[in-house]
Amino acid sequence: MAAMRALQRSGLIRHIGVSNYSLERWQAAEGALGRPVLSNQVRFNLVIVGPSKALLNGRQRTTGW
């Protein structure tokens, strides 16, 4: 995340997103950046919904979404 933070501060990128991060890892990334990670592309599965529910519930608690 240090490299991403440096790119963001230099103005080369505006926003940061991640892929397949657990809620804990997503929150750790935000802590390291000092800003929100705007997206987390996760595998969506209609049969196995556990990971999606955990992420959604966690984001609702921390952001009010």
Image (cartoon, helix red, strand yellow):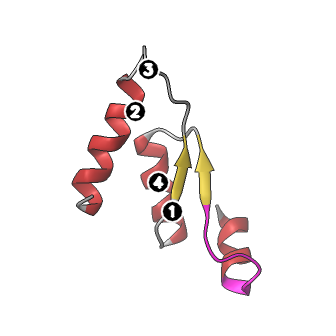
Residue wearing tag 2: 52
Residue 14 x %, y %: 64, 77
Q: Residue at x 32, y 32 (%)?
A: 53
Tell me the mark number nearer the camera, choosing from 2 and 4: 2
Q: Residue furthest front?
A: 46
In the rendered structure, which amino acid carries the disc numbered 3?
Leu
User: Which span of residues is magenta-colored?
Assistant: 9-16
- Is 5 included in the stretch rendered in magenta? no
Q: Is residue 17 left or right of residue 34?
A: right
Number of residues whose C-alpha sits closer than 10 Å to that of mark 3, classed few (under 14), some (14–19) or many (20 or more): few
Number of residues whose C-alpha sits closer than 10 Å to that of mark 4, classed few (under 14), some (14–19) or many (20 or more): some
* Quarter holding residue 19: top right
Give me the C-alpha separation between circle 1 and circle 4.
Answer: 13 Å
Q: Quadrant of the N terminus?
A: bottom right
Closer to the camera in the image, 2 or 14: 14
Secondary structure predominantly adopted by residues drawn in magenta: loop
Give me the C-alpha separation between circle 3 and circle 4.
Answer: 27 Å
Residue 45 x %, y %: 49, 22
Residue 34 x %, y %: 48, 73
Q: Residue at x 53, y 41 (%)?
A: 21
In the rendered structure, which amino acid carries the disc numbered 2?
Ser
Tell me the mark number nearer the camera, choosing from 3 and 1: 3
Give me the C-alpha separation between circle 2 and circle 4.
Answer: 18 Å
Q: Residue at x 33, y 42 (%)?
A: 56
Label for residue 46?
3
Q: Earlier in the sequence, mark 1 or mark 4?
A: 4
Number of residues whose C-alpha sits closer than 10 Å to that of mark 2, classed few (under 14), some (14–19) or many (20 or more): some
Q: Are marks 3 and 4 in contact (CB under 8 Å)?
A: no
Tell me the mark number nearer the camera, choosing from 2 and 3: 3
Label for residue 28?
4
